[in-house]
Amino acid sequence: MVHCFTWEGTHIVVDVYSGAVHIMEPAAYALTEYYAAHGWEDTPPQETVLAELNAFAPQDLAQAYEELKELVEQGLLFTPDAYAEIAKNYHNQPVVKALCIHIAHDCNLRCAYCFADEGAFGGTRELMPEEVGKAAIDFVIARSGNRRNIEIDFFGGEPLMNFDVVKSTVAYARSREQETGKRFRFTITTNGMLLTDDIMEYINENMVNVVLSIDGRKEVNDRVRCRVDGSGSYDKIVPKFQKLAESRGQDNYYVRGTFTRHNLDFAQDVLHLADLGFKQTSVEPVVAPFDVDYALQYEDIPKIYEQYDILAKEYIRRRKEGKGFNFFHFMVDLDQGPCVYKRLSGCGSGSEYLAVAPNGDIYPCHQFVGNEEFRMGNVLKQEEPFRRDISETFASCNVYSKPACRDCWAKFYCSGGCPANAQQFNGDLNKPYDLGCELQRKRIECAIAIKAALAEEEE
Amino acid sequence: MKQVKTLNGKVLTKSVAGGGCGECQTSCQSACKTSCTVANQKCENIK
Ligand code: SF4
Ligand code: SF4
């Protein structure tokens, strides 16, 4: 399988099963498209091919063919699928390697789009007691098998509303590292309202990554991310985020936002974050049912694509001028990146990755918290049976178990999308949220095109 | 003129051999957390 696309006049071919990416001159590109449609041929282009591609000089096509042939022989073009069998036999070990700890189901903001029901997750506002945090650590140690690295993400609601328990949980985990041979890596997500110098210092000492929530321009941010009294959060959080980002050497953090139908010109929000001095940015499409006013619709796709293109062009321009920044979705490592096994099933929810609610209930991931159907157990109630069936169902999902992904050229970059979204939109873990897929593929095209543009520059 | 410029090699084909050690970070692809898209993740065995 190949994916051919043209970005700003550059013809790009992705060979899906080898992972190779080629930049082609028009004749080679046209020939590749021809063979993609008709199947590769081991003999140089005959009359019918030449007639169909008569816009190109025969000697260009002849040379292009020779080059393509070499690539095919080297396993860099029209590479056959060698992973379907691996996927069938590959079953994630029932090993938990990451937990999302919902340290506070409460929030000091009232963001309109919050999937967490403004921190309450459909339940009551609640802070995680210390013993639940500890029990969560015991739980993950017990279930992590031979795995050495364990990731713990403190999430909410707003985690800083229960910061003492963040600290006691970190301390407890650290105290068990030596005896268990585990190494914990902590991350935290915050809206910034309660950040103080002391907390920043603590975060810098203890967290490998921190996610700072902000949507972009002031009017965009404040329209959605407002306080209980309706006033915006922008003025309060920006200086704190800037300080924290600087104190981390502009690395190992993200300012992350969400764009909605209200700011379809979101490229400006990303650039605004970059203009504020942030080097690590991420702004992602909102995921919301089609009937709410801020939800993205299919008809918005052309506008959104245009924005990704605008952003990609500016991204390249700033890079070339030495003023580059990172945009999470444009970062792709073509030379290395994770192995095929990882790429077969990306997120690991329900099996490798679980979420723990303030009362100790365990769910497949943060998006499922509060959904009784998916409650898997409780960290305080070791005697209660753990829902291994749920875990098995999630573990069996991969890009080959999902018909849409199987046929998708982007599967080894995307790894099958978000199962929570699939469940939410289609009631089926194996049926990805299609609008999200359309945007995902566009972002990956841009990411690859950026690599191509910067590679041309290096020459 | 050369018709094709190849940006990278057969990264996927080669990565099968390792068997998948599982030490890498978990990734969350949803719109609410920022660890999405596996293609930018790092392999723990490459330093
Ligand atoms: S973009 Fe959609 S169809 Fe393609 S791999 Fe991702 S989830 Fe699957
Ligand atoms: S199911 Fe979706 S939200 Fe949950 S961990 Fe996976 S990608 Fe993230």
Image (spheres, coloured by chain):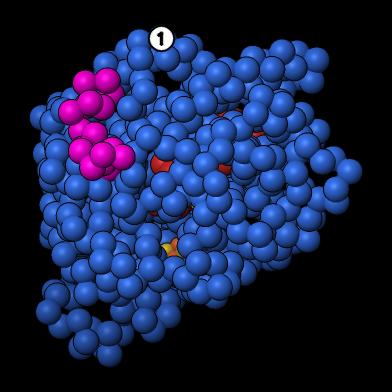
Chain colours: A blue, B red
User: Nearest the camera: A115 or A77?
Assistant: A115
State left or right for residue A255 relative to residue A79.
left
Q: Residue at x 26, y 52 (%)?
A: A259
Picture coordinates of residue A106 (x, y %)? 47, 38
Q: Quadrant of the N terminus of chain A?
A: bottom left
On screen, A101 above or below A86? Answer: above
User: Nearest the camera: A163 or A318?
Assistant: A163
Q: Is residue A231 magenta?
A: yes
Chain identity of mark 1: A
State left or right for residue A271 relative to residue A343.
left
SS class, disc 1: helix
User: Nearest the camera: A125 or A434?
Assistant: A125
State left or right for residue A279 relative to residue B39.
left
Q: Residue at x 75, y 44 (%)?
A: A378
State left or right for residue A271 relative to residue A288.
left
* Chain part drawn in magenta: A225-241
Residue sitting at the far front: A229
Q: Residue at x 34, y 44 (%)?
A: A110
User: Nearest the camera: A352 or A172?
Assistant: A172
Picture coordinates of residue A322 (x, y %)? 15, 26
Q: Amino acid at mark 1?
A: Asp
On screen, A1 above or below A244? Answer: below
- Residue A80 shows in the view: no
- Residue A421 shows in the view: yes
Residue at mark 1? A198
Picture coordinates of residue B13 (x, y %)? 55, 52
